[in-house]
């Protein structure tokens, strides 16, 4: 009888210990998606495939979004009053800064605007070089300056996500200005992470491989061109716009609150080789 009582007591004690450990391990936390409700975000390059997907994701999660692009007619359309379309040329140093500053404080910024001039090294033009560096790198700095100034004024500990590329580190032919611009973005992001981190503002990169937007499909439809790149991707495929949006949403959210100064490769393993 005493043996049975002892066994029962031991079993109950063990169950109590397990339940206590379970309660201490499992912490109740809101889902990542809930973070975005009623917060404010700016997305540059919102006319393109990746930008439109990111805007759509944010609107679907009940966020307020400023969709920025050069041509208002090509920006995402929606009856949702939380979507505001704004014509901004991120390459215009003064006007871009003042227009973004007028938008007021936001909780997050996605620097997605970018151009690519497909030119070999020997045939790189001044226009191709200047336009690419101006939009892809200098634009990131100027838009971010305005956003950060508003964040500081409003005491917002926000997040900035810069869209870079795997070829910021692994060059490919005929992309000298693009490779240079995205290499600059990597260093801009690191500098921002160091300087803005103490203010509670996080800055990270998303570094995609080739992305199958409408333009991406056209540019990489030739197997002679795409084949050598695909062979270096262990997953054997290029990225889709939604893959990039997944990474961006994570870095904007508080689920990445200890992530700062990171290059997040969305490349199917391309950078491992």
Image (spheres, helix red, strand yellow):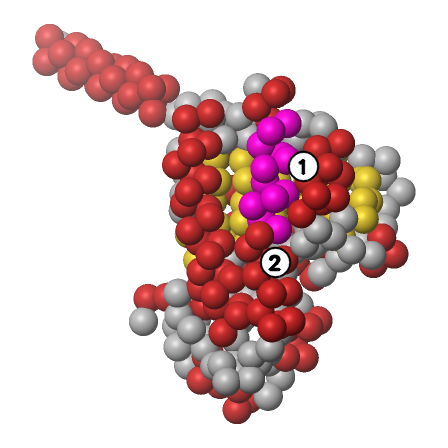
Mark 2 is surrounded, within 10 Å at the Cα level, by few (under 14), some (14 to 19) or many (20 or more) other residues, namely: many
Marker disc for residue 30: none
Q: Is residue 134 magenta?
A: no
| Residue at the farthest bottom position | 224
Q: Quadrant of residue 228?
A: bottom left
**Foreground: disc 1 or disc 2:** 2
Is residue 158 placed above or below 155 in the rendered structure? below
Residue at 25% across, 17% down: 17
Residue 248 appears in view: no
Mark 1 is surrounded, within 10 Å at the Cα level, by few (under 14), some (14 to 19) or many (20 or more) other residues, namely: many
Marks 1 and 2, how far apart in space? 23 Å
**Residue 71 image offset from top left, x and y in percent:** 83, 57
Residue at 82% across, 45% down: 85
Q: Main secondary structure of the magenta part?
A: helix
Circle 1 sits on which residue?
A: 41
Relative placement, left or right, of 216 versus 256 is right
**Residue 74 image offset from top left, x and y in percent:** 83, 58
Marker disc for residue 134: 2
| Residue at the farthest front position | 126
Q: Quadrant of residue 113?
A: bottom right
Residue at 51% across, 62% down: 181
SS under mark 2? helix
Query: Is mark 1 in CB contact (under 8 Å) with mark 2?
Result: no
- Region in magenta: 139-150
SS under mark 1? strand
* Viewer-side residue, 182 vs 109: 182
Q: Is residue 149 magenta?
A: yes
């Amino acid at each position: 009888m005493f043996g049975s009582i002892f066994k029962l007591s031991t079993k109950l004690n063990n169950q109590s210990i397990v339940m206590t450990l379970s309660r201490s391990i499992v912490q109740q936390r809101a889902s990542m998606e809930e973070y975005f409700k009623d917060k404010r975000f700016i997305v540059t390059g919102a006319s393109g495939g990746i930008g439109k997907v990111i805007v759509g994701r944010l609107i679907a999660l009940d966020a307020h979004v400023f969709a920025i692009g050069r041509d208002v007619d090509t920006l995402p359309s929606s009856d949702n009053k939380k979507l505001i379309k704004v014509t901004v040329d991120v390459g215009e140093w003064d006007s871009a800064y003042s227009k973004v500053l007028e938008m007021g404080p936001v909780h997050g910024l996605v620097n997605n605007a970018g151009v690519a001039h497909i030119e070999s090294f020997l045939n790189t033009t001044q226009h191709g070089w200047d336009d690419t560096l101006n939009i892809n790198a200098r634009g990131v700095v100027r838009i971010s300056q305005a956003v950060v100034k508003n964040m500081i004024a409003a005491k917002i500990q926000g997040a900035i996500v810069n869209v870079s590329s795997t070829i910021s580190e692994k060059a490919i032919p005929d992309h000298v200005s693009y490779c240079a611009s995205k290499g600059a973005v990597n260093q801009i992001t690191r500098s921002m992470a160091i300087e803005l981190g103490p203010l509670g503002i996080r800055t990270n990169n998303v570094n995609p491989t080739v992305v199958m937007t409408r333009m991406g499909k056209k540019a990489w439809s030739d197997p002679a061109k795409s084949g050598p790149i695909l062979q270096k991707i262990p997953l054997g495929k290029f990225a889709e716009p939604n893959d990039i949006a997944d990474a961006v949403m994570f870095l904007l959210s508080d689920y990445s609150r200890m992530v700062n100064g990171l290059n997040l490769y969305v490349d199917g393993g391309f950078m491992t080789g």
